[in-house]
Image: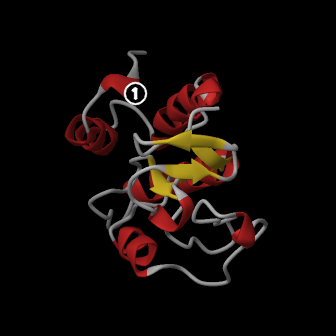
């Protein structure tokens, strides 16, 4: 099988819908890519099991029903946006271990269009601060909008 992580969103959508590959195959490759790049410290929390469960649901839905425009497409959610049941810190120690019982408007709207295959929460500066900021969860400073290590 080809490297699905190198395909565009449109190519992933079309290949999934045509049956060329399954949503589970896409999710497995993206989960492996996230795990293989942990040294980049790009995710505050990874949710590979959630991604696989959502991919399996998308595969079942493909067989007999309506598919949202982003069904089967994996994505990472910025840690700034509350996701029900997933640690959401907005880059702040104040929110350490906070698992919101609700969805943000952003994630709720993504779910409405079938974007259920979540890889995890992408790192965020503290409350999305601008300029030079300390990445409190890693203890390093940044001016680039991401926190190394």
Q: Give 73 or 16, whichever is nearer the viewer.
A: 73
What percent of the width, then of the height, locates residue 133?
51, 52
Viewer can see residue 122:
no
What residue appears at the point 57 percent right and 29 percent down from the top-left corner? 40
What residue appears at the point 64 percent right and 66 percent down from the top-left corner? 88
**Colouring of the image:** secondary structure
What percent of the width, then of the height, locates residue 15?
28, 35
What residue appears at the point 62 percent right and 75 percent down from the top-left corner? 84
- The quarter holding residue 39 reads top right
Q: Residue furthest front?
A: 132
Q: Give 10 or 40, whichever is nearer the viewer.
A: 40
Q: Which residue is mark 1?
A: 5
Quadrant occupied by the C terminus: top right
Left-right relation of 136 to 79: right
Task: Tell me if residue 29 comes above or below residue 99 in the rendering.
Answer: above
- The quarter holding residue 17 reads top left
What percent of the width, then of the height, locates residue 96?
76, 65
Q: Residue furthest right?
A: 97
Left-right relation of 68 to 37: left
Q: Secondary structure at mark 1?
A: helix
């Amino acid at each position: 099988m080809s490297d699905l992580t190198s395909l565009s969103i449109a190519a992933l959508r079309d290949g999934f819908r045509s049956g060329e590959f399954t949503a589970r195959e896409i999710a497995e490759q993206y989960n492996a890519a996230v795990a293989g790049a942990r040294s980049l410290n790009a995710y505050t929390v990874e949710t590979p099991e959630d991604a696989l469960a959502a991919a399996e649901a998308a595969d079942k839905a493909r067989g007999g029903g309506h598919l949202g425009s982003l069904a089967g497409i994996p994505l990472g959610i910025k840690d700034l946006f509350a996701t029900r049941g997933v640690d959401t810190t907005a880059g702040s120690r104040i929110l350490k271990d906070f698992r919101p019982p609700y969805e943000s408007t952003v994630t709720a709207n993504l779910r409405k269009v079938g974007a259920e295959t979540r890889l995890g929460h992408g790192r965020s500066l503290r409350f999305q601060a601008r300029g030079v900021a300390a990445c409190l969860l890693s203890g390093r400073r940044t001016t680039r909008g991401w926190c190394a290590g």
